[in-house]
């Protein structure tokens, strides 16, 4: 738990946080229903390779962060910040920085040498945020998705 003068603390997310996490995801353009969010949380929360935190200011969830251990054949394992959002009404107060610091603390327990975050090229405020936290830009890439139809999902 982290506490500061704005009465902010961090804790692990819980399925009961689904509505707030879905609301905040919508602020970044990722529309998600509370039921969808709850299903995702129930899948991820028990997995020790996933770390999902919420920042609580007063009685309200002001942000969340999802970090996860990633591994591929071509690279040594790393921790990825898979998602981070701070309520648009509370940005610029250090909440995101505290969430990232807690993710870095968690990463230090995972025997990795790197923490990575990916950010859409249009999110220039996020780019500044991460470079101010000493993250270095390493590459730009394109993402290609293929949506499987129901027959292919079996």
Image (cartoon, rainbow, N blue to C red):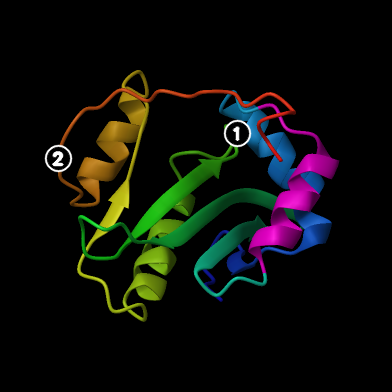
Left or right, 115 with respect to 100, comes to left
Can you see residue 58?
no
Q: Is residue 13 above or below residue 82?
A: below
Q: SS of the residue at dot 2?
A: loop
Q: Is residue 92 above or below residue 122?
A: below
Q: SS of the residue at dot 1?
A: loop
Q: Which residue is mark 1?
A: 89
Residue at x 31%, y 57% (from the top left corner): 72
Distance between the alpha carbons at the discs numbered 1 and 2: 30 Å
| Most foreground residue, 133 or 43 | 43
Q: Which mark is residue 19?
A: none
Magenta segment's dominant SS is helix
Give neighbour class at mark 1: few <14, some 14-19, many 20+ (Cα, 10 Å): few
Percent across and percent down for residue 95 are 48, 52
Quadrant in which residue 113 is drawn: bottom left
Give neighbour class at mark 2: few <14, some 14-19, many 20+ (Cα, 10 Å): few
Specify start and end residues of the magenta stretch as a single range. Answer: 31-45
């Amino acid at each position: 738990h982290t506490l500061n003068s704005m009465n902010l603390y961090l804790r692990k997310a819980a399925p009961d946080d689904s509505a707030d996490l879905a609301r905040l995801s919508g602020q970044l353009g990722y529309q998600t229903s509370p039921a969808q969010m709850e299903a995702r949380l129930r899948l991820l929360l028990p997995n020790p390779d996933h770390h999902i935190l919420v920042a609580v200011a007063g009685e309200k969830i002001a942000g969340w962060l999802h970090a996860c251990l990633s591994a591929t054949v071509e690279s040594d394992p790393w921790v990825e910040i898979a998602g981070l959002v701070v309520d648009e009404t509370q940005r610029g107060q250090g909440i995101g920085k505290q969430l990232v610091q807690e993710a870095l603390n968690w990463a230090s327990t995972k025997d990795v040498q790197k923490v990575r975050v990916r950010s859409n090229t249009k999110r220039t405020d996020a780019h500044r945020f991460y470079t101010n936290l000493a993250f270095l830009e390493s590459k730009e890439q394109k993402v290609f998705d293929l949506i499987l139809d129901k027959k292919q999902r079996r």
